[in-house]
Amino acid sequence: MKENEWILCPVCKNKTRIKIRRDTVLINFPLFCPKCKQETLVNINEWNMSLVKEPDAKTQSQ
């Protein structure tokens, strides 16, 4: 059984510089990919990764 696993970038599917264990829990973690230079907010729980959708910035009305 695997004890550690690399987190894969959700955009380009390459390895990032972060390794996690099975009992790792990350909430709103800014995951940076050194290859595609993208930063993505993710939630991770027991090796299941889900993307966090950020609301678009609203323009201020006068």
Image: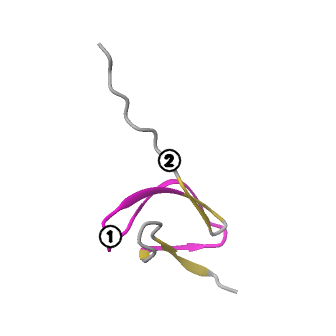
Q: Is residue 57 magenta?
A: no
Residue sticking out furthest to the bottom: 1
* Amino acid bearing label 2: Lys
Q: Nearer the viewer, residue 38 or 31?
A: 38
Residue at 47% across / 66% down in the picture?
Answer: 10
Name the dominant secondary structure of the magenta segment.
strand
Residue under circle 1? 36
Specify which label sits upstream in the sequence, 2 or 1: 1
Q: Which residues are magenta?
A: 17-42
Q: Please identify the quadrant where the N terminus is shown.
A: bottom right
Q: Nearer the viewer, residue 56 or 4?
A: 56
Q: Is residue 23 magenta?
A: yes
Query: Where, by quadrant of the figure, is residue 15 drawn?
Result: bottom left
User: Disc count in the image?
Assistant: 2
Residue under circle 2? 53
Mark 1, residues whose alpha carbon is within 10 Å: few (<14), some, or many (≥20)?
few
The structure's colour scheme is: secondary structure
Q: Nearer the viewer, residue 7 or 19?
A: 7
Residue at 32% across / 17% down in the picture?
Answer: 61
Residue sticking out furthest to the right: 1
Residue at 46% across / 74% down in the picture?
Answer: 13
Q: Nearer the viewer, residue 1 or 49?
A: 49
Where is residue 36 drawn, in percent x and y?
32, 70
Relative vertical location of residue 6 with respect to residue 39 in this rendering, above or below: below
The residues bearing labels 2 and 1 have C-alpha atoms spaced at a distance of 19 Å
* Amino acid bearing label 1: Cys
